[in-house]
Amino acid sequence: MRYLHTMVRVRDLDASMRFYCEGLGLVEAYRMESEKGRFTLVYLSAPEDAEAAKARKAPLLELTYNWDDEEYQGGRNFGHLAYQVEDIYAACQHLMDMGVTINRPPRDGHMAFVRSPDGISIELLQNGHLEPAEPWASMPNTGAW
C-alpha cells in the first residue's frame, strides 16, 4: 500500500491557492477540470517532492473546487485519504471479512471507498487496472462515501 493524497474541498480556489502556495510554499503538481462534473482538482506538493509528485510518486494535497456554490459544514470540506493497493479486490474482501462496509465497491476494478470507525472516508485505488469482476461489478453503493 502507498499513501497517495488527502483531499479538501475549497470554496475559493484563488484564495486557497494563495494560502497553500504563497503562504505555505506548496507547489502545483498538476490539475484536472471536469466540465461534466463541474469541478476542478488541483494537486499540490512540497517543493522537494515536486518532480516525484508530477509523476504521481509523492504524497499530495488535493484541492477540490466544486463550481456550484456549496456551504461545507460538519467537516464536509475534508474529503478523504487515498491509498494505492496492489489488489483492490483482495483489499476490499479483507476489509469486508473484518466487518467493514464497502461504501463504493470497486465495480470498475480501479476505485473503492470505505469509512474508518470514526467516519473518515478512505479511497482505495488500484495500482494499474483490474478487469471488472463479480461480486464487485454488480454491487451497489452503500451509504455515503
Image (tube, rainbow, N blue to C red):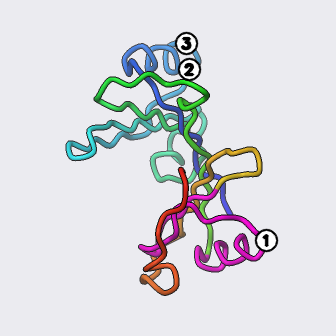
Residue that label 2 marks? 25
Between residues 25 and 94, which one lies in front from this camera angle?
Answer: 94
Q: Residue at x 58, y 33 (%)?
A: 78
Q: Amino acid at mark 2?
A: Gly
Q: Is residue 62 left or right of residue 81?
A: left
Tell me if residue 124 comes above or below residue 139 in the rendering: above
Report how far apart the C-alphas of labels 1 and 3 lie in the structure: 42 Å
Few, some or many residues within 10 Å of mark 3 (<14, 14–19, 20+):
few
Name the amino acid, label 1.
Met
Residue 93 among magenta residues: yes
Which circle, 1 or 2, is nearer the viewer? 1
Q: Residues within 10 Å of mark 2 (few under 14, many from 20)?
A: some
Which residue is at 52% across, 84% downward? 135
Q: Which mark is residue 23?
A: 3
The x, y position of residue 32, in whole percent, is 32, 43
- Residue drawn at x 62%, y 48% as measured from the top left: 121
Magenta stretch: give its range: 87-114
Q: Position of residue 50 (x, y in %)?
A: 52, 39
Secondary element under disc 1, as helix, strand or loop, is loop
Q: Which mark is residue 98?
A: 1
Asked whether, in this view, residue 66 is left or right of residue 122, the answer is left
Q: Secondary structure at mark 2?
A: loop
| Vertical position of residue 100 compared to residue 138: above or below | above
Mark 2 and mark 3: span between their CA atoms? 6 Å
Whether tag 2 and tag 3 are in contact, CB under 8 A, the answer is yes
